[in-house]
Image (cartoon, rainbow, N blue to C red):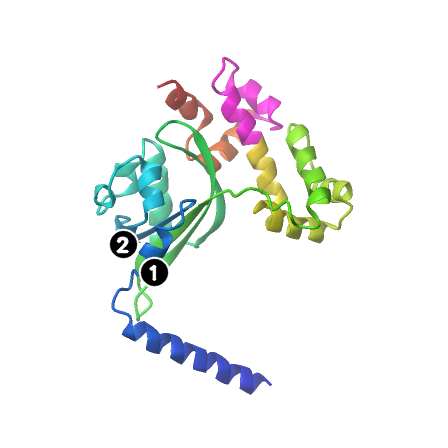
């Protein structure tokens, strides 16, 4: 059985290599991603400069044509300090760091409306294994799959998160609310909401925080109101997800 599986894998690899050698345009996927308005697609060179982009990224950046992005880095495209954060993320991948897999991110669009995305970035390598660039996608969070048979039970746990995000919410408690095991609720959250329970808790807390940052409350008060035990933990989570500190985000909203 093992020998047969090995042969199947080798045949699949040979077929892949043979087709790859015949494709003239290595970036054929650009046109496919142009048809997906809720998915950003990009390819960057070893310096982190855009080489290929789709229309969704053009719209997200508030420019009119792809040419406005090509050969530029995120630091030259996005508002400070968001662009510098995205570039640093790219350079870490290009330096041989781990690929980025479904990282929850809050973006501030050109009209200053916030938007949630799940981002993936992978290094691109040549035949010798050297990193020559990176490719990535950033998916706008989709609507919940309400047709899933488990939706009603999982939605009960999601409502608990929305109503009690300022409190500790262990996964075991969410599982009991949905009458599921821990493994089941994690699996169904991904299928229905495209988020893990932990990601949804972070989203609920930072949604509330981003609204409160438009008002007069201090960052410490906002941290407490959003379920963070201390100011520093809140700031670390906010910067890891948004790319800027709460104070910087507040200044951008007011600017």
Foreground residue, 18 or 221? 18
Q: Secondary structure at mark 2?
A: loop
For residue 232, side relative to residue 73 (left or right): right
Queried whether the magenta region covers residue 210, the answer comes back as yes
The residue sitting at 43% across, 54% down in the picture is 99
Where is the N terminus found, in terms of image quarters?
A: bottom right
Residue 188 drawn at (x, y percent): 66, 50
Q: Secondary structure at mark 1?
A: strand
N-terminal of the two: label 1 or label 2?
2
Circle 2 crowding by C-alpha within 10 Å: few under 14, some 14–19, many from 20:
some
The residue sitting at 69% across, 36% down in the picture is 169
Q: Which residues are magenta?
A: 205-230
Residue 170 drawn at (x, y percent): 70, 39
Residue to which mark 1 is pinned:
124
Can the viewer see residue 219?
A: yes
Residue 230 drawn at (x, y percent): 58, 26
Circle 1 crowding by C-alpha within 10 Å: few under 14, some 14–19, many from 20:
some
Quadrant in which residue 81 is drawn: top left
Can the viewer see residue 164?
A: no
Residue to which mark 2 is pinned:
46
């Amino acid at each position: 059985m093992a020998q047969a599986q090995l042969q199947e894998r080798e045949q699949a690899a040979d077929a892949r290599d043979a087709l790859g050698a015949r494709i003239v345009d290595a970036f054929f996927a650009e046109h496919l991603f142009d048809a997906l308005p809720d998915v950003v697609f990009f390819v960057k060179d070893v310096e982190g400069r855009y080489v290929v982009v789709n229309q969704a990224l053009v719209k997200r950046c508030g420019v009119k044509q792809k040419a406005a992005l090509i050969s530029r880095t995120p630091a030259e495209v996005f508002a400070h300090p968001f662009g510098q954060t995205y570039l640093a993320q790219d350079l870490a991948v290009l330096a041989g760091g781990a690929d980025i897999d479904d990282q929850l991110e809050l973006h501030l669009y050109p009209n200053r409306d916030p938007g949630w995305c799940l981002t993936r970035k992978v290094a691109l390598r040549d035949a010798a294994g050297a990193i020559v660039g990176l490719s990535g996608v950033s998916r706008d969070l989709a609507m919940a799959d309400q047709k899933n048979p488990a939706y009603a039970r999982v939605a009960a746990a999601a409502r608990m998160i929305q109503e009690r995000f300022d409190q500790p919410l262990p996964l075991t408690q969410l599982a009991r609310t949905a009458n599921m095991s821990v493994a089941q609720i994690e699996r169904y959250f991904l299928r229905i909401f495209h988020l893990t329970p932990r990601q949804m808790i972070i989203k609920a807390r930072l949604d509330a925080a981003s609204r409160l940052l438009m008002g007069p409350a201090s960052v410490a008060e906002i941290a407490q109101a959003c379920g963070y035990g201390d100011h520093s933990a809140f700031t670390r989570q906010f910067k890891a997800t948004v790319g800027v500190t709460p104070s910087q985000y507040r200044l951008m909203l007011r600017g």
